[in-house]
Amino acid sequence: MSSALPIRSLMSIGEIIGLLRPDFPDVTISKIRFLESEGLVDPARTPSGYRKFSHADVERLRYVLAAQRDHYLPLRVIKAQLEALDRGDVPRRGPRRPGPVGAADVGDLRAARLTREQLIEQAGIDAELLDQLEEYGLIEPRRRDGTFDTDARSMAVLASALRSFGLEPRHLRTFRTAAEREAGLIEQLVSPLLRQRSLDARVRAQELAREVGDLSLQLHAALVHAALGRSVGG
């Protein structure tokens, strides 16, 4: 841990920003402080209260920032992955080895662009199902290069599982409509921050959108479970 190292061998928050900004141009001091407040990083403190970061802290922050940028993961999921690493476990699609999170691990997170063939193989689906998912707007390739992200892979896996119960892609359009409505509400919530056009405001908007999105997913799941309880649970 950082606190076990001599303070003079550690780095200030300004130095941390300088190291991270080439890969994460939007990172700010307020962003680092927010991640600390959420328990994602735990820097040492000088007797006067200044934060001091180790190289392990830097790599931990790289992991968090890459997971947010490339996978749009909520903080609670990223925190769970880091806790799994700290215990010596290996989180799904995460770093291949236990211990401090390193640059090679972050590289795994960045491998988020899948060709059509890779998506079919990794999701375990056939080309026909992918065609149907695209036809009904459940999965869309990137406009620039036609590749797919890991969200598309997750949706393909879930759609395949639902099809095994008789739910075809055409039946899933209601889920897409509900998701678009929820996303629209969140966009309205963060739009005042986005209009400020500053990096700090954009970071706060991204964090707010992720956290509210995560809460909306939990609410949606609770509503579905309650409805099923009323209709079939007795």
Image: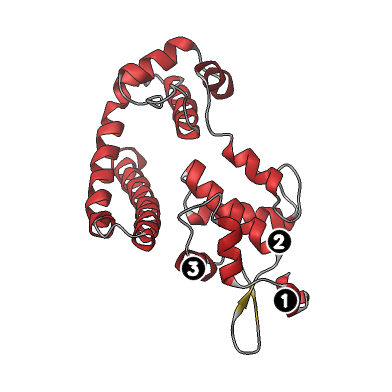
Give the residue type at disc 1. Ser
Residue situated in front as seen by the camera: 31 or 74: 31
Image quadrant holding the N terminus, namely bottom right
* Residue on which the image places disc 2: 56
Give the residue type at disc 2. Ala
Q: Residue at x 76, y 46 (%)?
A: 97
Secondary-structure class at tag 3: helix
The answer to which of marks 1 and 2 sits earlier in the sequence is: 1
Mark 3 Cα within 10 Å, few/some/many (few <14, many 20+)? Answer: few
Secondary-structure class at tag 2: helix
* Residue on which the image places disc 1: 3
* Residue on which the image places disc 3: 29
**Left or right: 200 in relation to 58:** left
Q: CA distance from mark 3 to mark 1?
A: 20 Å
Residue 159 position, x and y percent, is 43, 25
Residue 108 position, x and y percent, is 64, 39
